[in-house]
Amino acid sequence: MSYPALFSILFFLVSVVSIVSGILVLLNNPKAPGNRCFFAIVIAISFWSVGLGFANIAPDAATCKPGGIFRPSAGGQYMPLSFTFS
């Protein structure tokens, strides 16, 4: 197995684990604003992680480019937001 495929599997697993943890937090108390904010951040992180996984297994840069929101570089614009809320 090649390293890009291995890293892509890891990125997809991180996405699944983060979505499950977000759902569990949201099921604990869905009306709390902190839980809703955490769930929104987890969804954004999982989209970013899936995009990074797809970018790793793309055969060339042209295939990776049409990703739009799923592109890992698109998440870089929102990185200061995550530092603000941490």
Image (cartoon, rainbow, N blue to C red):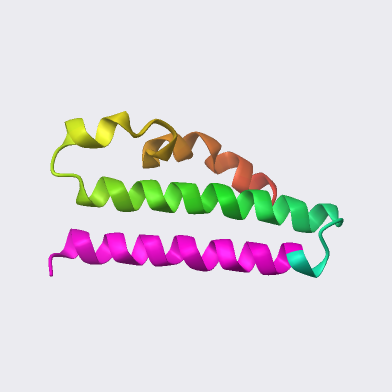
Q: Residue 15 colored magenta?
A: yes
The answer, for residue 49, to whether it is visible in the render is yes
Looking at the rendering, the stretch of residues picked out in magenta corresponds to: 1-26
Q: Position of residue 28 (x, y in %)?
A: 79, 69
Q: Position of residue 2 (x, y in %)?
A: 13, 65
- Magenta: main secondary structure equals helix
Say above or below: 67 vs 79: above
Q: Quadrant of the N terminus?
A: bottom left
Instruction: In the displayed orientation, state which residue is furthest to the right.
Output: 31
Q: Position of residue 74 (x, y in %)?
A: 43, 34
Left or right side of 29 for 80: left
Q: Quadrant of residue 64 in the image?
A: top left
Q: Could you tell me which residue is drawn at 23 percent across and 67 percent down?
A: 6
The answer, for residue 86, to whether it is visible in the render is no
Left or right side of 44 for 32: right
**Depth order, front residue of 86/17:** 17
Q: Residue 16 colored magenta?
A: yes
Q: Quadrant of the C terminus?
A: bottom right
